Image (tube, rainbow, N blue to C red):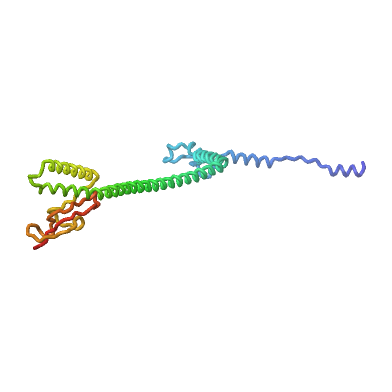
Amino acid sequence: MSPNKKASGRNHIPVEFVDTEPESEISSESQAVNEPREENGPNENVIPDEFAGVDVEAVEDRAEDPSESSSDEINKDEVSYQSTQANTGELGGPVLAELVATRAELKRVEFEIADLKDRLARRQADFENYRKRVERERADTYERAVAEIAAKLLPVLDNLKRALDVEANVESTESDEFRHFLSGVDLIFKQLAGVLEGLGMKPITAVGARFDPHIHEAVVSESTDEYEPDTVMQEITRGYRLGDKLIRPALVKVAVKK
């Protein structure tokens, strides 16, 4: 036998591995896991009397997920908010621009309506003032025309009145023809006086009235006890007025204190 073979024979030692110790450790660990601990004593799983009617499983499920119901509501709100944000993101720009334009147009229309109303009110006020001015000018023109005509006709009426006053002094010896003539003059006087009265001419009261320098003109004064001082005793020429306008003052005789 060669030395190398002997050396190899001496160095080759058969070894049997018996792994008994780890197995015992694993089994002891599994046994420790499977066996319940008794750290808190034998009464650990006993339920107190005040919790006897409580559903333990329901409480445990609720404890495992306490925010389940609120989480569902939050999820719904998030979905609604996200959909709103999506719609706003897609349509927010055009809709907002259209809204702004509509409001601006509304403001413009409101301003235009207010301006038109103001113009209408001004036009109505101007028209009302114009109507009143035209009516006033028409009335003034009518009064001036009547006053001019009356001023030319009043002397004729005065002469007719003087002719009628003569009738009282006519003697009974005068002919009937003359009396008929005076009757015709009286008819003409009344007709002309009616025409002037129809135009708005009214005679001014004189005899027995208090002397008024605005409507009376004293041409004669007489001292007498029959009348109060400053009383019209006699009407010499009749005065007339047209409405509130004096056409001619009455010429009168006034009584003065004796």
Q: x, y (%) of residue 159?
A: 19, 49
- Quarter of the picture containing the N terminus is top right
- Quarter of the picture containing the C terminus is bottom left
Q: x, y (%) of residue 64?
A: 52, 40
Front-most of 184 and 80?
A: 184
Which residue shows up at 48% across the image and 36% down it? Answer: 58
Front-most of 5 and 58?
A: 58
Which residue shows up at 20% across the image and 45% down it? Answer: 193
Q: Quadrant of residue 231?
A: bottom left
Residue projecting furthest to the right: 2
Q: Quadrant of residue 120?
A: top left
Q: x, y (%) of residue 247?
A: 24, 52
Q: Would residue 36 be seen by someone viewing this image from the given angle?
A: no
Q: Would residue 91 be seen by someone viewing this image from the given angle?
A: yes
Q: How many marks?
A: 0
Using the image, determine if residue 62 lies above or below residue 240: above
Q: x, y (%) of residue 213?
A: 19, 58
Q: Is residue 74 left or right of residue 219?
A: right
Front-most of 137 and 257?
A: 257
Using the image, determine if residue 55 lies above or below residue 152: above
Q: Is residue 105 left or right of residue 162?
A: right
Using the image, determine if residue 230 lies above or below residue 110: below
Q: Quadrant of residue 215?
A: bottom left
Which residue shows up at 81% across the image and 42% down it? Answer: 13
